[in-house]
Image: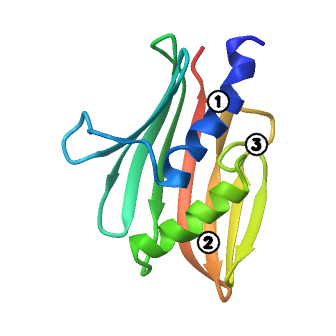
Amino acid sequence: MNKLEQLEPFLIKARANTYASDEGRVKAALNNSSQLEYMEGDWLYRDVYYTGKNTFYGMETVFYLNKPIFGMSYYGNWGDMTEEEIDNILRGALVNNKETRLYKKVEWEKDGFIYTCDPDSTAGIDEIGGTETIAKNGEQVYVFYYAGSVLV
């Protein structure tokens, strides 16, 4: 299996072992940021993000042999919910739907919250982008925009 065939499974595993499981926190290299990392063999996943007032922005990068081969930027807004409330719902959605935030449409429901990940393209990991939302009682309570691509 070549490195591009290994990328998607590694990315899914890395996400499951960092934000989705509330693990992988390391000392952040950039001031006022948070940083998550997961390493396996020649692979490194790094997620650096900033949290503001009900919003966040970040960038995921996957490195192979210390060279970046995939990157994705993102922005989200959790509105009137607390960060803890939204984290609880998102972590459940990500743990139960590991392929979300890629190129497959995902819908998931728990405790009256409806999570949807709606990709702009379903072609594959080479170029990804889309919107993730959470609704409660028909009203959107969270939105997340993402875009990324393979870099090699």
> Mark 3, residues whose alpha carbon is within 10 Å: few (<14), some, or many (≥20)?
some
Q: Earlier in the sequence, mark 1 or mark 3?
A: 1
User: Spatial distance from mark 3 to mark 2, Cα to Cα?
Assistant: 20 Å
The label nearer to you, 1 versus 3, is 1
Marks 3 and 1: in contact by CB < 8 Å?
no
- The three-letter amino acid code for the residue at tag 2 is Ile
Q: Is residue 52 above or below residue 126?
A: below
Nearest the viewer among 144 and 39 is: 39
> Mark 1, residues whose alpha carbon is within 10 Å: few (<14), some, or many (≥20)?
many
Q: Quadrant of the C terminus?
A: top right
Mark 1 lies on residue? 10
Mark 3 lies on residue? 121
> Please, what secondary structure does the residue beneath circle 3 have?
loop
Q: Earlier in the sequence, mark 3 or mark 2?
A: 3
Give the quarter of the image for residue 69.
Answer: top right
User: Spatial distance from mark 2 to mark 1, Cα to Cα?
Assistant: 26 Å
User: Spatial distance from mark 1 to mark 3, Cα to Cα?
Assistant: 21 Å
Q: On the picture, is 143 further left or further right than 110?
A: left
Mark 2 lies on residue? 134
Furthest-left residue in this view: 31
Give the quarter of the image for residue 126.
Answer: top right
Q: Is residue 76 above or below residue 13?
A: below
